[in-house]
Image (cartoon, grey):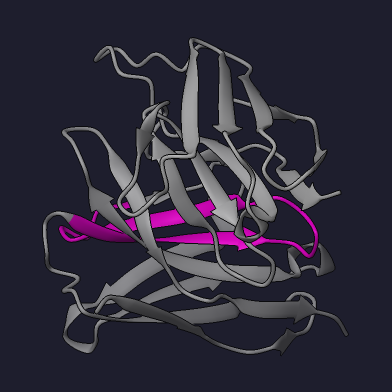
Amino acid sequence: DIVMTQTPLSSPVTLGQPASISCRSSQSLVHSDGNTYLSWLQQRPGQPPRLLIYKISNRFSGVPDRFSGSGAGTDFTLKISRVEAEDVGVYYCMQATQFPSWTFGQGTKVEIK
Amino acid sequence: QVTLKESGPVLVKPTETLTLTCTVSGFSLSNARMGVSWIRQPPGKALEWLAHIFSNDEKSYSTSLKSRLTISKDTSKSQVVLTMTNMDPVDTATYYCARILRWGFLEWLPDYWGQGTLVTVSS
């Protein structure tokens, strides 16, 4: 199974400042079809996860444009351009290149300083 | 409006079998572009995918838990059922069901989630 490793595990951020989360996979996530099936999910406190980004950099429906994804191969990044109070929560990367198997990172907690 | 709701026991004993039901509304389990997945989350820990079921009744399971899991659906009742045998305290977790939507030829995205149900395994 592919192992997903996120850093940092915790990210205290000042409101209005940027935040960045890294995710590294134990093997390349490039599928034989040429796509890279790496997603990011947000889990606010007490809530179920919510899909933010798919295929590295595509924002899902309704996701604000302050969220962006980038990366290739085994290294990926989620950036929040200006953190708002509603962005507090835990963020997970998820690989679906080995679909039907999904694996998640350990999560990164974004909190306000 | 798409909704999913998990139901099942709050407490199970070690070695017992857990049965969870996901009742969906706002979409049909016979829709070829949609399926349902189960994902769990131990308290304070990360998400773990368990199983998928698709409209054609195709099923997929986590490799590590495959021997203990069974997923099934009743389209007429709009329900997906997950059973997990031989429960252990390490299986204590919030269990979520999610709709997965076929977004591309090979891509299925979890676009709607239930609120989850916390299952505690203890004697």
Going by the image, does B54 lie left or right of A50?
left
Q: Identify which residue, B9 or B5, lies in the foreground.
A: B5
Say above or below: B33 vs B25: above
From the image, give the main secondary structure of the stretch colored magenta.
strand
Q: Identify which residue, B77 or A43, lies in the foreground.
A: A43
Q: Identify which residue, A14 or A60, lies in the foreground.
A: A14
Say above or below: A50 vs A92: below
Image quadrant in which you'd find residue B97: bottom left
Query: How many marks can you see?
Result: 0
- Percent position (x, y) of residue B84? 58, 69
The residue at the point 25 percent across, 53 percent down is B101
The residue at the point 16 percent across, 33 percent down is B105
Residue B86 visible somewhere in the drawing: no
Say above or below: A77 vs A91: above
Q: Is residue B39 magenta?
A: yes
Residue B37 visible somewhere in the drawing: yes
Q: Quadrant of the N terminus of chain A?
A: top right
Residue interval drawn in magenta: B34-59
